[in-house]
Amino acid sequence: MRIAIAEDRPDDGSQLISDISSWASEHNIPLIPPPDLYENGESLLEHFSPEKYDIIFLDIFMEGINGMETARRIRETDHVCRLVFITMTSEFAIDSFDVHASWYLLKPYSYEKLSQALARCGADFLEQRQYLTVPGKYGGQRLLLHQIVWTEYINRQICVHLENGTELYIRIRQSEFADLLLSYPYFCDCMKGILVNLEFIEELKEHCFVLRNGQILPISRLKYRDVREKYLDFSYANVRNQSGTSNINDH
């Protein structure tokens, strides 16, 4: 999930990052990279580009360009990212419809209200659409992360096995590709040259993973303990997310 915050009060910005991070952890949604905090609208717009962020939180009352004007400039090039206003007054609530804001968060907001805002943004859906842009000479190709089942390094290129059964070949070093994927908690390095998406694991056995499609992926004996721990942590987080926390869409 890619999130930006424009907030001229550092304490408020830090608290919002903390609350968003707590929510993301509870719902097993990785924030990669961590939310970007900008001190005003000008700073945000200077670093902004279309599709860079999934959700942008905007304080309305900031020095220079206020949050509403910042939102209008964002909408000139990006009509997809979700916008959430944060302010101490409901004065501009009607204006927020003009820029298709997802939520209007009044300070001081409660954690429950922030959860509702993220639900209205469709944060779970946005997470499922997360993609990776492969860098380098052969870069520019987008890979939807949750469609990657596993990858293997063959003949100096990566073979990406997708959920629909297709295979993509990308010329990139294994170490570079691993650095990209392993920053997400649902990918695991189970064997030299092999990365697997834990979302597609049916069963963990003593020396291998069994995928949902019946395919077997080996696990290095030297890595088994760490791989097992990561898989169990991932499985526990999924169970907790599904049954141990309230569904924010029910509020």
Image (cartoon, rainbow, N blue to C red):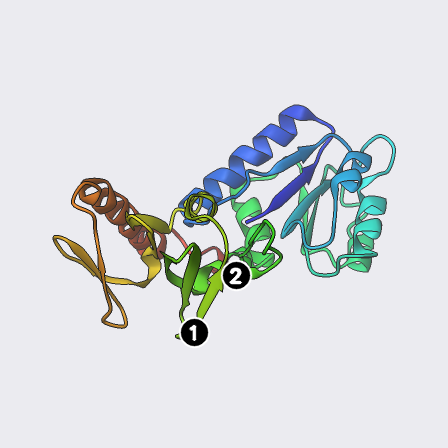
Asked if residue 211 lies left or right of residue 45, the reply is left
Q: Decide which of tag 2 and tag 1 comes sooner along the chain.
A: 2
* Mark 2: amino acid: Leu
* Residue found at the very far front of the displayed protein: 155
Q: Position of residue 37 (x, y in %)?
A: 66, 33
Under tag 1, what secondary structure?
Answer: loop
Number of marks: 2
Neighbours of disc 2 within 10 Å: few (<14), some (14-19), many (20+) = some
Q: Which label is found at residue 143?
A: 2
Q: Foreground residue, 164 or 237? A: 164
Asked if residue 203 lies left or right of residue 133, the reply is left
Which residue matches tag 1?
Answer: 166
- 3D distance between C-alphas at marks 2 and 1: 12 Å
Quarter-wise, where is residue 33 in the image?
A: top right
Q: Position of residue 131 (x, y in %)?
A: 54, 57
**Residue at horizontal 33%, vertical 51%?**
193
